[in-house]
């Protein structure tokens, strides 16, 4: 399937698992967060990992993990009943701080040359945005560290006021901010939440990538196209 650049004016990317390789970037932090919250109690660590869909042995995430597709407030809701000493707002703030702490070389781009890829897409006249379930502040820091933040005209997190995926709010926000209509925008993401946003928001296409925990078989029934990574986008778009 070639979407065709003449039909596309905008590309709205997920961040984690799409612009960033999910396991390589977030596996070690997942382990550190769970060990800190469990304070050395093995049973609690196992329960936190189970709720998070995280394998402590392989430091990898299951496709249905709330850390993969959910926003931080969803993770907090799952963990809070296990953590009597934490208040909701305190835990959410602490998790945002942990996400912000992943910087520099710890960020593993899901592209061989993410700067070159973004330049190529922009040179083709495309307007680019990011819609993530991470916080807006961490997202901007990560895109700054990747040296691609200037490529994006729209960056939204779960806390930016657009709601969460699979709702259409972030796609609608992208359209309102940039003037690029949803029906001329493709959504690129690694989870069913991303593809659900594409459908609920009336995007031209929802394209799944395999640089997150989801397998091809998880995405195919919900995506217009599944590609290995964002590096395949120029071929898809014919640019």
Image (tube, rainbow, N blue to C red):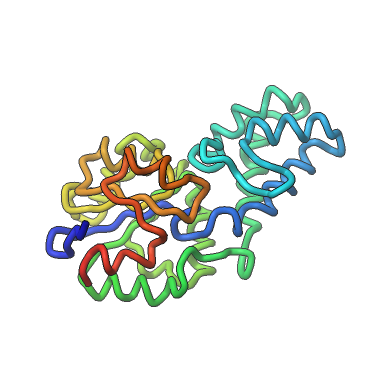
- Can you tell which quarter of the image residue 94 is in? top right
| Residue drawn at 44 percent across, 53 percent down | 210
**Can you say whether 158 is above or below 29 in the image?**
above
**Can you say whether 5 is above or below 22 in the image?**
below
Quarter of the image that includes the N terminus:
bottom left
| Residue drawn at 58 percent across, 64 percent down | 107
Q: Is residue 89 left or right of residue 118?
A: right
Q: Position of residue 135 (x, y in %)?
A: 51, 47
Q: Position of residue 173 (x, y in %)?
A: 29, 46
Q: Is residue 104 left or right of residue 216?
A: right
- Can you tell which quarter of the image residue 201 is in? top left
How many numbered marks have been drawn onto this rendered protein structure? 0
Pick the residue in front: 137 or 122: 122
Q: Is residue 108 left or right of residue 165?
A: right
| Residue drawn at 31 percent across, 44 percent down | 223
**Can you say whether 235 is above or below 116 in the image?**
above
Quarter of the image that includes the C terminus:
bottom left
Pick the residue in front: 215 or 151: 215
**Farthest residue toward the front?**
217
Q: Position of residue 179 (x, y in %)?
A: 19, 54
**Farthest residue toward the right?**
40
Q: Position of residue 126 (x, y in %)?
A: 23, 65
| Residue drawn at 84 percent across, 38 percent down | 39
């Amino acid at each position: 399937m070639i979407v065709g650049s003449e039909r596309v004016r905008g590309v709205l990317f997920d961040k984690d698992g799409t612009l960033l390789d999910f396991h390589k970037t977030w596996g070690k932090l997942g382990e550190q967060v769970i060990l800190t919250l469990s304070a050395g109690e093995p049973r609690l660590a196992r329960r936190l990992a189970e709720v998070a869909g995280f394998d402590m042995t392989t430091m990898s995430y299951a496709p249905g993990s709330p850390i993969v597709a959910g926003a931080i407030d969803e993770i907090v809701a799952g963990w809070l009943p296990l953590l009597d000493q934490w208040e909701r707002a305190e835990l959410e703030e602490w998790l945002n701080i942990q996400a912000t702490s992943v910087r520099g070389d710890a960020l593993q781009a899901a592209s061989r040359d993410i700067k070159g890829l973004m330049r190529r897409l922009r040179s083709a006249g495309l307007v680019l945005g990011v819609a993530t379930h991470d916080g807006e502040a961490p997202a901007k820091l990560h895109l700054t560290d990747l040296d691609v933040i200037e490529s994006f005209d729209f960056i939204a997190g779960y806390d930016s006021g657009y709601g969460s995926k699979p709702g259409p709010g972030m796609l609608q926000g992208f359209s309102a901010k940039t003037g690029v209509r949803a029906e001329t925008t493709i959504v690129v993401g690694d989870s069913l939440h991303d593809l659900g946003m594409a459908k609920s928001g009336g995007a031209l296409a929802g394209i799944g990538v395999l640089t997150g925990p989801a397998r091809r078989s998880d995405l195919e029934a919900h995506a217009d196209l599944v590609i290995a990574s964002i590096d395949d986008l120029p071929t898809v778009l014919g640019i």
